[in-house]
Each structure stands twice: as structure tokens, then as C-alpha cells.
Amino acid sequence: QSMPTQPPSVSGAPGQRVTISCTGTSSNIGAGFNVHWYQQRPGTAPKLLIYDNDNRASGVPDRFSGSKSDTSASLVITGLQAEDEADYYCQSYDSSLSGSRVFGGGTKLTVL
Amino acid sequence: QLQLQESGSGLVKPSQTLSLVCNVSGGSISSDGQSWSWIRQPPGKGLEWLGYIYHSGSAHFKPSLKSRITISLDRPNNQFSLRLTSVTAADTAVYYCARAIGGYGDYFDYWGPGILVTVSS
């Protein structure tokens, strides 16, 4: 079972566009399993942002979008705002050991 | 609106058993098409899925924890619980309960606020 890989940190100025990558393996993302994204602000529980690769959860602004291709997925945030500063996690299913859900290591987004 | 709330001991001694309960309100844990998970986050680190139990009662666990973990349903009280035996300092974390929907590719759409559990003598 292998955890998807995310960059530890990304940053951008207000109004800019940032992309967070999530690179998996042939037993999770590469096997065709869906990817989901969560936002976690300090001291709070994670919040579902994107589900099934590219669907925004209820109430999520259209500045957030997701995509998936082969063994990787991406979260794109446009029109960056100060409130977007948070940790972001991707999540998928891993078939190498039955029943396992796996999270990426997380990416800290800093709004400059 | 579904709500989840974790409760239990915030301090556990090494080698003892960690026990947490997740109370679910606004929906039934016995409804079809959903599973109930425990996820933890050590201080300053990322998220780790521990295991889940389906509405039917069947459960699956992270392989590395299989010998120490139990998740069970309490249908009359609309709760589910986590037991983790033989804890060490490495089990110190914020523990979240969450609901998942979506089958094999499921995702966690509702989370509890989390409870910090510290393993220390």
C-alpha cells in the first residue's frame, strides 16, 4: 500500500492560480479509482472539497476545480484568496491490500 | 443535516486500550450506501485512515493495525466505536470519525470535529 505523493508546500499571491498535484501508483489512482480532495484549516476537521475527481462538493466556490489523468490528479485554485490558506489532501482507494483508503501526505498552501 | 461527534478518554497510558465513540445525529447509521470510518492525525502530520464499518456491520482495517483495532456499531444509540489496544506514544493524535459514501471509490463527506488523544504515563 503506497501513499499518493503531494508537494509539501505551494504558494501564490492573491488573485493568482495555483495547482496542487497528487501522484499515485498502479494500485490506487493508476488503477482507475476516483480521487477526492479535502481542505483543512488550522485547528479544524478536514472539509470535502472535490469528489470523484472533478465534482465540487456543496457550497464550494467554482474557483476550485479537480482533474485526473493516468496515475495523477490535480487540484486547481484560481483567483486565490487569503481564506484559501490551508492544508489540502488528496484521497483515493488502494487495491494492493483490500479495503484500504489512502490519503496523500498533504500540501500546505500559503497565500503571500 | 448529519452531525458526528467524538467522545472518549483524552489521555491513555502506554500499553492500555484507547476507546472512542462517535455519536451520529441527523441520520441513521443503519441506512444503506454508507460506511463509518475512523481517521487520525498525529500532531503536525497528515491524515491516516484507520478503518471503517459498513451499515451492515462488516468492517475493514488498515493492514498495519489489524491486530490491534476493533470498530463496532451500536445501532440502538446510533453510534459507532473504536478500540485500539496496546497503544504507544505513536498513537497520540487527533482522532476523527467520518461518514463515507460512494462504494469502492468512496469519499468522506461528513466529519466530526475531532478529539485529541494523548498516550502518556
Image (cartoon, coloured by chain):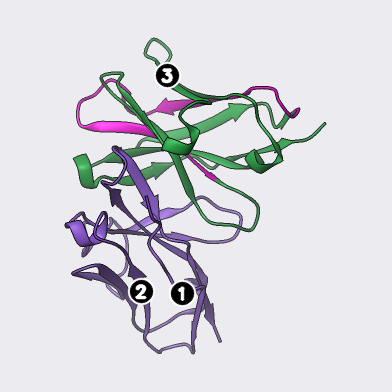
Q: Is residue B2 above or below residue A69?
A: above
Q: Is residue A28 visible?
A: yes
Secondary element at tag 2 = strand
- Residue position marked by numbered label 2 in the rendering: A21
Amino acid of disc 2: Ser
Magenta stretch: residue A112 in it? Answer: no
Question: Could you tell me which chain the residue with mark 1 belongs to?
Answer: A
Q: Are marks 1 and 2 on the same chain?
A: yes
Quadrant containing the C terminus of chain B is: top right
Left or right: residue B6 compared with residue B98:
right
Q: Are marks 3 and 2 on the same chain?
A: no
Amino acid of disc 3: Ser
Residue in the image at 66% along x and 43% along y: B90
**Which hue belongs to chain A?**
purple
**Which hue belongs to chain B?**
green
Expressed as whole percent of the image width and height from the top left, the position of residue B76 reads 39, 10
